């Protein structure tokens, strides 16, 4: 019985997350939020070089995305 309850809670969380993501994309546009590990590649993002070729390559778009908030820790 407990497993069924856990599955329902998990399903509710997945639905809530999907709804939140779709609302954010609807309000701010596609590409405004991404899930870690997504395979979707966006080619038309402008970037600012970090000055480190290795880091720019690792970031995947040639630097930090221009016009976006980036958190570095």
Image (cartoon, rainbow, N blue to C red):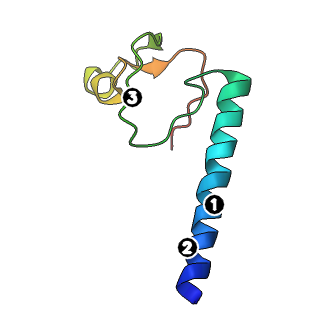
Q: Looking at the figure, which quarter contains the N terminus?
A: bottom right
CA gap between label 2 and label 1 equals: 10 Å
The residue identified by callout 2 is: 7
CA gap between label 1 and label 3 equals: 23 Å
The residue identified by callout 1 is: 13
Nearer to us in this view, 1 or 50: 1
Q: Which mark is residue 40?
A: 3
Within 10 Å of the Cα at label 2, are there few (<14), some (14-19), or many (20+) other Cα atoms? few
CA gap between label 3 and label 2 equals: 28 Å
Label 2 with label 1: CB-CB less than 8 Å: no
Q: Give the secondary structure at mark 3.
A: loop
Question: Relative to 44, is 16 on the left or the right?
Answer: right
Within 10 Å of the Cα at label 1, are there few (<14), some (14-19), or many (20+) other Cα atoms? few
Within 10 Å of the Cα at label 3, are there few (<14), some (14-19), or many (20+) other Cα atoms? few
In the depicted structure, whether residue 37 falls above or below residue 5: above
Please tell me which of labels 1 and 3 falls first in the chain: 1
Q: Which residue appears at 65% of the width and 62% of the height?
A: 12
Label 3 with label 2: CB-CB less than 8 Å: no
Q: Position of residue 57 (x, y in %)?
A: 28, 23
Q: Which residue appears at 64% of the width and 21% of the height?
A: 29
Q: Nearer the viewer, mark 2 or mark 1?
A: 2
Please tell me which of labels 2 and 1 falls first in the chain: 2
Q: Which residue appears at 51% of the width and 44% of the height?
A: 73
Please tell me which of labels 3 and 2 falls first in the chain: 2
Which image quarter: residue 61?
top left
Question: Relative to 10, is 57 on the left or the right?
Answer: left
């Amino acid at each position: 019985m407990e497993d069924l309850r856990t599955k329902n809670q998990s399903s509710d969380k997945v639905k809530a997350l999907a709804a939140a993501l779709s609302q954010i994309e609807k309000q701010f546009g596609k590409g405004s939020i991404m899930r870690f590990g997504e395979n979707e590649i966006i080619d038309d993002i402008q970037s600012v070089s970090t000055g480190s070729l290795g880091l720019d390559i690792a970031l995947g778009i040639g630097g930090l995305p221009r016009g976006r908030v980036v958190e570095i820790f």
